[in-house]
Amino acid sequence: MNPFDYHAPTSLQETFDLLDTYGEDAHLMAGGTALVLLMQQGLLQPGHVVGLQKVAELQGIRRLDDGGLQIRAMATHRQAEKSSAVQAYCPALVENFSHVATIRIRNQGTVGGNLAHADPAQDPPPMLIALGGEAVIASRDGERRVPLDEFFVDYFETAIKPGEVLLSIDLPPLPQGTRVTYKKFLPRTQDDYATVSVAAALKLGPDNTCEDVRVALGASATIPVHARNVESALKGQRLDAEKIKEAAALVRDEVDPLDDLRGSANYKREMARVWTQRALQELLDAGA
Ligand SMILES: Cc1cc2nc3c(=O)[nH]c(=O)nc-3n(C[C@H](O)[C@H](O)[C@H](O)COP(=O)(O)OP(=O)(O)OC[C@H]3O[C@@H](n4cnc5c(N)ncnc54)[C@H](O)[C@@H]3O)c2cc1C
């Protein structure tokens, strides 16, 4: 690894100053689990690493006044998995964080670092999209909000611009009775990245009429996929196994998987359909 200077700001203001001073030669580091690998491989060679561990504004997880949830960027996956605020907001989100790698990585890796890293096979992004999350991005000029389904631009690329820092992920209140699930298809080992993953949130009305639904997939394209066509086919419909099967089949045209060591694109396309159907059927059956 090339030598670099390490900076440890304690506030966002100091962080912006460092980013201004060193420009393109500076790179932010949260837990370092992804960044250090890229530096070891020579893919990134910053002269200045700006560590975010001590930045006060980036710490913590809390319920918002409106009943939503705020996860600050430096919260680790393990903190999120163990948080009573996350548990009270949505138990399926706790389970989602427990699917990230191993306890060792979850203790070190942060939720903000995960989103900013933007590997499409990661677990939290589809779940946070299905919950309607927004990224709050801070810069010297103030804050801006980006819905998470617009945050991911391409493989390893997000809407975060130079000079900006991801501050938090804000989730809206979940309407009472919303059922949520996360399915991670892991045919190889339990601590692997997903071959395909599906997150779904469903709110049913009388007679199993779909009042609202959100579906998002991981490991199914170069960015997490918000499956809007599946959602449109379900909204307002009275749900049964046949309706769910028909809607899930639409996901085949929404995903665009890559061939890799976890399977061919065709195989993953079919697995996206299968796991979308299973996730939605599980949510329908949860009330039976
Ligand atoms: C062996 C291994 C297995 C893994 N398995 C899984 C898995 O099964 N599921 C899964 O979801 N993930 C998995 N991961 C990925 C892991 O979740 C990420 O590496 C981790 O979340 C990144 O967080 P970090 O704090 O270490 O980020 P860092 O490595 O410190 O940073 C990653 C990137 O984000 C940028 N960044 C960090 N914080 C901010 C911020 N606040 N604002 C702007 N940019 C920022 C950095 O500049 C860098 O480019 C695995 C990683 C490893 C090493």
Image (cartoon, helix red, strand yellow):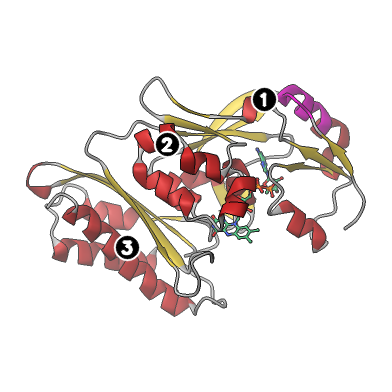
Q: Is residue 45 above or below residue 74?
A: below
169 sits to left or right of 137? left
Amino acid at the residue labelled 2? Val
Residue stretch in magenta: 9-18
Could you tell me residue 52's position as x and y percent? Answer: 72, 35
Query: Which kind of residue does numbered mark 1 sit on?
Result: Ala
The local secondary structure at tag 2 comes to helix
* 131 on left or right of 204: right
Residue that appears at 67% across and 34% down = 165
Report the mark closest to the observer, 2 or 3.
2
Give the amino acid type for the residue marked by disc 3 in the picture: Thr
Residue beneath label 1, please? Answer: 56
Q: What is the quadrant of the N terminus in the image?
A: bottom right
Mark-to-mark CA distance, 2 and 3:
24 Å
- Mark 2 or mark 1, earlier in chain: 1
Label 1 Cα crowd, 10 Å radius (few <14 / some 14-19 / many 20+): few
Residue 276's mark? 3
Q: Nearer the viewer, residue 39 or 155?
A: 39
Mark 1 secondary-structure assignment: helix
